[in-house]
Image (tube, grey):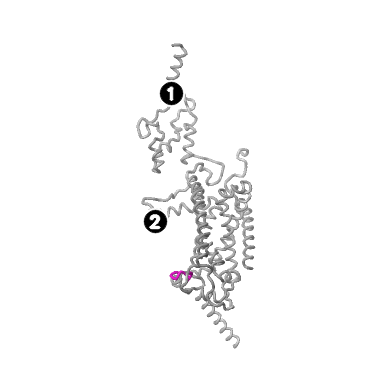
Amino acid sequence: MTILQQMLRVFVLILFAGGALAQDGPADGPRAATGGAQTLEDILARQARQPVDDGFRREATGDPDAAAPVTAPLGTRGGASDSDLWRALRYDSADVTTRNNGPAATVLIQDGGMWWLRFREGPLLGYGAWFLIGTLGVLALFFLLRGRIRIDGEKTGRTVTRFKAIERFAHWLLAGSFLLLGLTGLISLFGRKYLIPTFGHEAFSTFAIGAKWVHNNVSWAFMVALVMIFLFWVIHNLPDRTDVKWLLKGGGIFGGGHPPAKKFNAGQKLIFWSVILLGGSISLTGLALLFPFELHLFAPTFQKLNDLGVPGWLQEGRSWPAALTPQEEMQYAQLWHAIVSLVLLAIIFGHIYIGTLGMEGAYDAMGSGEVEEQWAREHHSLWLDEVKAREAGTDRAGTKGAKA
Amino acid sequence: MKAMLLAVCAMVVIAVGANFALRNYAGFSAQERTTVGESVRLDR
């Protein structure tokens, strides 16, 4: 055996011995075989969506106190390796200082982001698109089956004032801003997937910046109009007994005569409260998105719902996260904002249909404010009686005043 | 129809007004709110 062969043997022995030493880990415990790293059981459990005790990773963030001083043999500068540091960042236990002054600046790795991104790019887009297309399909089918709802009786040629100018102004401010917000919101939500492949990145970028400007600033008009509409009409939209009768008759849409209704029938009241409650919720989450990290809506809400035991109704022992990172707050706000907006859009599609194509004479209420008396008799008979009684009272008072 | 046109005008006025007020008086900018304005390295 040559000297060279002997040296090679010694080298190989040292190499294997070194490798064995490097793999030395905990002598006992479930991860002894892997030297403290994850095991096949961990991987299988994660794939089966079962909880995995990640303490072996979470707590392996270095120990500067136990580290050999830098002057000692094999001494380190701080006792934490790069891997230790990244694990500490990953589990949010690193002591991070930054000149960046945002509330979310010290959260460098955020697990919830991937869940949010997958949901936003997957189910939210897919189900959202089909939900809106399905709503339009149902309305088209309804139109084919039912046709336009005509004024049954003979038209009188007389009109009744249904809405004053200020009411119509508030309605159109709300409607116009909502449609613009809906359109620009859909561009923001679906643009990356559907518009970029068609128009390219640069054209979409210009388009998206414009849509964002409109969305951010027109939102204030929507909120102003929402408050106006609430103040003007809340008194007329409180539920009462006539609503039950109206609903039991299906609003007379499929025949069986026109059920009596006051200024707003039960269907319109449902639209009103949908707009107020869903629009209010969209406004709140919209404000949280307009002023990033300022409003914390979801952590306190989840905490209250947990206290009431609401998550347990869905699944035993379940609770919702009551400690959220600033980014998670924004992600929940974005999802809620988008989902509720899609629902409200679908409701408004129905409202637009019945107010224009679906019913003869309905548009006049918001167009000129004057409706055909026969239309009012058929769809809002109790309200027409009130108007007539008021007019008669005014006439009598006027006549008395004239005589005096 | 007049109410509708007036509402459209009001919407434009509110949007432009909101943009002006938020930019000039409320520091409404994610960049301004979440980063320091000065150069970090040179100020040290």
Q: Is residue A129 magenta?
A: no
Magenta segment's dominant SS is helix
Image x and y of residue A245, in percent: 44, 72
Q: Residue at x 62, y 41 (%)?
A: B39
Residue bearing the label numbered 1: A18
Task: Tell me the chain of label 1.
Answer: A
Q: Residue at x 48, y 50 (%)?
A: A123
Q: Which residues are magenta?
A: A247-253
User: Looking at this view, is A29 or B37 the one in front?
Assistant: A29
User: Looking at this view, is A279 or A349 the one in front?
Assistant: A349
> What amino acid is labelled 1 in the image?
Gly
Residue bearing the label numbered 2: A308
Q: Residue at x 58, y 56 (%)?
A: A183
> What amino acid is labelled 2 in the image?
Leu
Q: Is residue A403 in sight in this rendering?
A: yes
User: Looking at this view, is A87 or B24 the one in front?
Assistant: A87
Q: Which of marks 1 and 2 precedes in the sequence?
A: 1
Image x and y of residue A105, in percent: 53, 44
Q: Secondary structure at mark 1?
A: helix
Bin the neighbour count of mark 1 within 10 Å (Cα to Cα): few under 14, some 14-19, many 20 and up: few
User: Looking at this view, is A351 or A199 the one in front?
Assistant: A199
Q: Residue at x 40, y 50 (%)?
A: A319
Please indicate whether residue A322 sits to the left or right of residue A223 in the image: left
